[in-house]
Image (cartoon, grey):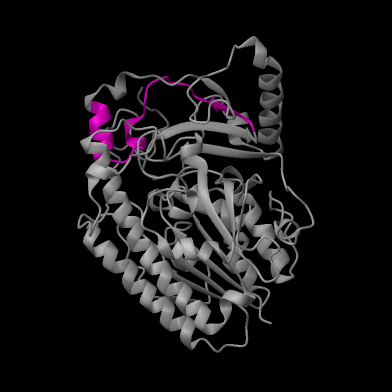
Amino acid sequence: MRKNIIYLHTHDSGRYWSPYGYNVPTPNLMDFASECTLFRQCYSSAPTCSPSRACLLTGMTPHESGMQGLASRGWQLNDYRCHMARYLGSYGYHTVLCGIQHEAPDYHMIGYSEVIGSQDFSMDRTEASMEDWDYANTDAAVSFISSYDGNEPLFLSVGLFNTHREYPKAKKDINPDYIQPPAVLYDCAKTREDMADYMESARVADTCFGRLFDALRAKGYLEESLILVTTDHGIAFPDMKCTLYDTGIGVACMISVPGNKLKGRATDALVSHYDIYPTVCEFAGIPIPEWTEGYSLMPFLKGETEKVRDEVFGEITYHASYEPERCIRTERYKLIRRFDYHENIVPANIDESLSKDFEVEAGLLRGIHEREELYDLWLDPVERTNLVGNADYKDVYDDLSARLHSWMEKTDDPLCHYRYRVPKPRNARVNKLTCMNPRLEDFEAPESSDYDY
């Protein structure tokens, strides 16, 4: 049996799919849930695109891999030999990319054996063309799966633009009057309309997944492959994407493997995107490289253990603007710590949307961030009651603080060395902290190390 690895991924979906209990039109993903293990407590390493994907595909923290910002804005991996596609290729895998990748400014740098479909990707495209772009790439992937007859095992990455903004506007049967926006947003006409647009984008992604699942099933790959379906981070709404709240780092993760003892079941085991690389290596029967930070999920999927980790870590350094944060999350508690502390909201790190417009008009930018935030997630799952300074939680704070600091030192986090700003690559594009819209050409000077408050 060839140990194929199929990696299917969306852009900015969080957990807003129907298998996670949301009224989002994703029936194909719901069907796939019966064939896989659904991880309800999976977390990305970072709530921003390139750092998150770089972690999953290298097994390293973003600050170790070099991907502390967006590849489209000037960041890249320190060593592309660590990329999963390159590493699997060195062990005889035929590696294929179709659609989105966000780990390199140029996909040629990664070193896939073959690239299919279109890589003519631009954030300036219209929502309609990106819907068509996903459908066209899905067709290319389906054609490839159906015709592949190589002797080598296959690593196939199929990346969808959806559910990234801009969302499709032609909602087939979604009436905004009868949907609920995410709990962190006020329920009003603008946020409902925004969420309805997200739901239509999710429908596009699900349609693509359905076609891919059908092709994999027809080829017999569903029964003999490791199939991973996931996303990079939370959905692109205020207090979600580009935050270290669970709404930012919480992600859908669905894994199917042959002989899975947890097939068709959901689990609350705490896992991280860090754990994907070791899992893939163990499944493929190749060495887990020493640079990886995670733990293989194969013993868990085989029913040999009930958990693989006690905590997950998350980070932000650069997104559109510089906003360095780190967090540690256990099953019950979370500590978020901000560095280079400025209390003001950073508007460019919130994607433009109807929901953002509503909150800005209501006074969002008058709000402040606290330097540290501690939450008891069992009693406060929406992370609203900051327990820093609460005597009843002093031992919890001290424990998480020590563990977070130890992790930062162990992984040589640059925030341990730079008193002020972590340097960005020369000529990287970073919005000023006062910039409202990440797409505005309101960038810092390329060689500048100064920034505005």
- Where's the C terminus, which quadrant? top left
Q: Position of residue 408 (x, y in %)?
A: 66, 34
Q: Position of residue 227 (x, y in %)?
A: 57, 67
Q: Position of residue 415 (x, y in %)?
A: 58, 31
Relative to 56, does residue 325 appear above or below in the rendering? above
- Residue lying furthest right: 304
In this view, the residue in front, 31 or 452, is 31
> Where is residue 129, by image quadrant?
bottom left
**In the rendered view, does 151 fall on the left or right side of 343?**
right
**In the rendered view, does 127 fall on the left or right side of 209?**
left
In this view, the residue in front, 283 or 87, is 283
- Where's the N terminus, which quadrant? bottom right
In this view, the residue in front, 332 or 66, is 332
Relative to 283, does residue 268 appear above or below in the rendering? above
In this view, the residue in front, 4 or 216, is 216
Residue stretch in magenta: 332-360
| Residue under the image location 42 percent in, 79 percent down | 142
| Residue under the image location 48 percent in, 57 percent down | 103
Q: Is 91 contained in the magenta span? A: no
Q: Quick check: can you spot residue 111? A: yes
Q: Position of residue 258 (x, y in %)?
A: 67, 71
Q: Quick check: can you spot residue 94? A: no
Relative to 127, does residue 401 appear above or below in the rendering? above
Q: Is 347 contained in the magenta span? A: yes
| Residue under the image location 27 percent in, 53 percent down | 167
**In the rendered view, does 72 fall on the left or right side of 168?**
right
